[in-house]
Image: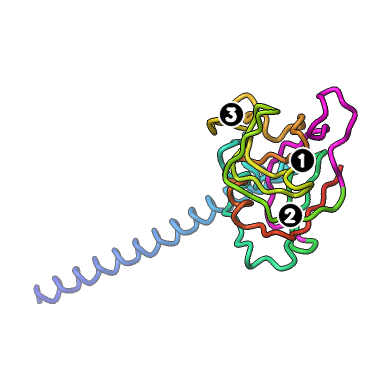
Amino acid sequence: MGQMNKKKVISWAIAVILVVIAVWSVVYMHQTEKKNEVKIAKLAKKEAALKKRNIDPDMRRPINWRKSSEKKSYPNAKLIPNLWVKVSLSKQKMYIMSGKKTIYKMYVSAGTNEAGFPNNSKKKFPKGTFHIQEKRGTFFYSPVFDEGAKYWVSWRGDSKSMIHTVPTDEKGKYKLDQAQKLGKKMNTNSSIRLSVKDAKWFYKNVAAGTKLVIKK
């Protein structure tokens, strides 16, 4: 009889423990769901606030001239159908496009004066439709402007106009005063500056013949 009572007590204890575990699991899952709902709501609210202030939540802020412009990974250019490139001078951004769809965005610095003209020149930065040219390289330096850059790609006038990194000196060392202005309009001698990582991706992935549209 005592043995049976002992078994009943053990069975009852196990049943109680299982009930407690089940209740705790339900409570824990409910609390977790609530926390996730709060996190999602906060994230949505933050993204809405950023969009209201015209700030893209995908873009890295503050701007880092060494890193990628977006926080997400670069796209595989080979898998992008109808790839073309758009540059907005007013927004100081480059858009990697697939037809009408924006695939990736990059901060740029593109000025108002063309190469060979003084800073007070009224000559405007070239706008219109161009095509990426064959010429490209990992480094150049121009004694005329006392400025160079890495990962350059020509898009007009046999390397007169290029897409490349923020500027360097003759030894390839980045000029911090210029690099830290990425994302702002400035005199760039008709070239388009990108962050180091963005320029490297562009140099390696955007083929000659790709359409480039530059708008105000």
Q: Main secondary structure of the magenta part?
A: loop
Rendered residue at 24%/65% (across/down): 13
Mark 3 sits on what residue?
169
Mark found first going from the N terminus, 1 or 3: 1
Image-quadrant location for residue 46: top right
> Left or right: where does residue 49 sit relative to residue 165?
right
> Left or right: where does residue 75 sit relative to residue 215?
left
Mark 1 sits on what residue?
54
> Left or right: where does residue 216 sit relative to residue 203?
right
> Left or right: where does residue 115 sit relative to residue 72?
right
Residue 107 lies in magenta, yes or no?
A: yes
Q: Which residues are magenta?
A: 101-127
- How many circles with numbers are drawn on the protein? 3
Image-quadrant location for residue 24: bottom left
Considering depth in this image, is 154 or 205 the residue closer to the camera?
154
Task: Tell whether label 2 touches label 1 (CB within 8 Å).
Answer: no
Rendered residue at 69%/44% (across/down): 163
Q: Which mark is residue 132?
A: 2
Depicted 138 relative to depicted 206: above or below:
above
| Amino acid type, residue under disc 3 in the picture | Asp
